[in-house]
Image (cartoon, rainbow, N blue to C red):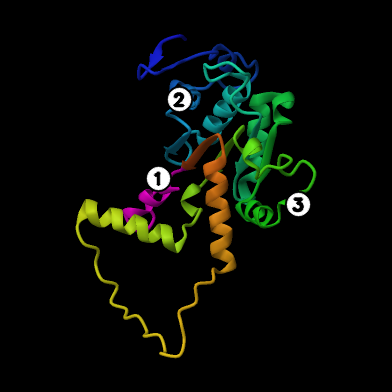
Amino acid sequence: DDAAVDGRCTLVGTQCLRDVPGHKTPNEMQIDVATHMLDAATRRALLFIASTGTGKTFTAATTAKTLLTQSGGGGGGPVAQHVVFVCKKANLRQMKSEIGDYVGSTLLASCYFVTPTRLKKRLRAPQTVLHNELPKDFHESKVAGKTLLVYDECHNIGISATQKAEVTEVAEVEGGAAQPSGKKKKPCPSNKTPSKSKTAAELTRERLFAYVQQCGRVLFLTATPVINEKEDILKLLHI
């Protein structure tokens, strides 16, 4: 259990992941993902791509238990004090049940489960967070910095217009000029200036991206990182 992973991270405390009477045991891949996230300097975030039915939820459970109970090597207690799981409503109850079965009731008290819509709504109005819905002051850097954010089906997270332009620019450098859309921009009337005000959706996305970047650890889960075009995966990596 103490073998090095990539020469930079050690499988510390994995015995606590294996010995869970009455429950399934993490496989080596799931343990590798969990221990990978312990390195604060180089492994703050991970995009985990796996087919449906291969254990993404249990991978999240393994990672949550590891970060809630293990230090990152520098001392100072566990890496994470809170885990925020973001999952669509249809799967939320099942995810909470699977996570709770594995981590136990004590650690489950440090886990929070919200839908993407709910998280975005709370980011717009953090003062309206309900009791036990999210950690207190979850959006502040001092709290977010000790939070593991697990975002299921992250390919649906969305991206702002500014970030999309940046991603397109990267894609053009990597794969040649982008194909023209065929649509012509309408000229702006001479007596009007283009509006620079941001829509509510754009502001919400910006708050979401800012929150993701504040979190101490981020685990993105998806089976379909590329939905429409190859640049989709660049969008996720950009976030």
Residue 145 lies, with reference to residue 211, above or below; the image says above
Of 92 and 195, the residue lying toward us = 195
Q: Earlier in the sequence, mark 2 or mark 3?
A: 2
Give the residues drawn in magenta, as a range.
222-239
Q: N-terminal of the two: label 1 or label 3?
A: 3
Amino acid beneath label 2: His
Q: Using the numbered discs, state the Cα–Cα distance from disc 2 to disc 1 in whole angstroms.
A: 17 Å
Mark 2: secondary structure: helix
Q: Do we see residue 224 in this rendering?
A: no
Q: Secondary structure at mark 3?
A: helix
User: Do the residues bearing badges 2 and 1 touch, measured as CB atoms within 8 Å?
Assistant: no
Which residue carries the number 3 mark? 127
Mark 1 vs mark 3: in front:
3
Q: Amino acid at mark 1?
A: Leu
Q: Position of residue 91 (x, y in %)?
A: 61, 46
Mark 1 falls on what kind of element?
Answer: helix
Q: Which residue is mark 2?
A: 36
Q: CA distance from mark 2 to mark 3?
A: 34 Å
The location of residue 143, given as percent across then percent down, is: 66, 36
**Residue matched to label 1:** 237
Tag shown at residue 166: none
